[in-house]
Amino acid sequence: MDLYQLLKDDHRDVESLLDRLAEGEDFDSDLFQTLRENLLAHAHAEDEIVYAALAQQPDASSLIVESRQDHQALEGLLDELTAGISEDEDWTTKLEDLDQLLAEHVEFEETELIPLAQRLLDEETETHLAERFLARKEQLGAAHSE
């Protein structure tokens, strides 16, 4: 099981959901809820499992701080969209902000954080983290959809 491919696959899935949401003329609350659930499950599992392991590595600690800040900002934008769906007709601006922040975060992770993790973590650790990441994401996804 390839931890880094799992992370990249999640990135593509969330990007696809965001693209579909942006294409609509009206706000699709069901699609947004799916995006929110997937993004939160990914971010929390990544933080709890992957970032926690990498934070133990001195070479990665500053990158982890930046990634965690990105996750907080993404979650804040999701909260703004959730709160403003009914009364804020200009949801497209917030969605564009989310798209921009997500694109920057994904690029940062895939060009800086993942290559560093590949150098710092051995294959056994990567496999173990991948299994724990998937299990935690599943737990979180179930919790978010209840």
Image: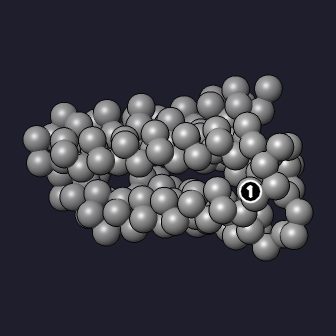
> Crowding near pointer 1: few (<14 within 10 Å), some, many (20+)?
some
Q: Position of residue 98 (x, y in %)?
A: 58, 57
Q: From the viewer's side, name the closer residue of 84 and 146.
A: 84
Residue 94 located left or right of residue 57: right
Image vertical order of residue 102 relative to residue 142, above or below:
below
Residue 16 located left or right of residue 74: right
Quarter holding residue 52: top left
Q: From the viewer's side, name the closer residue of 32 and 144.
A: 32
Image quarter of the C terminus: top right
| Residue located farthest toward the bottom when viewing the structure as drawn | 23
Q: From the viewer's side, name the closer residue of 57 and 68.
A: 68
Q: Residue at x 47, y 45 (%)?
A: 73
Q: Circle 1 — which element? A: helix
Image vertical order of residue 22 relative to residue 57, above or below:
below
Q: Residue at x 85, y 49 (%)?
A: 29
Q: Position of residue 66 (x, y in %)?
A: 29, 47
Q: Position of residue 8 (x, y in %)?
A: 49, 62
Q: Is residue 124 visible?
A: no
Image vertical order of residue 6 relative to residue 72, above or below:
below
Q: Is residue 22 visible?
A: yes
Residue 78 located left or right of residue 82: left
Q: Residue at x 86, y 49 (%)?
A: 30
Look at label 1 and name its amino acid.
Trp
Residue at image mark 1? 91
Number of labels in the image equals 1
Give the colour scheme shown: one colour
Q: Position of residue 5 (x, y in %)?
A: 46, 62
Q: Residue at x 67, y 36 (%)?
A: 141
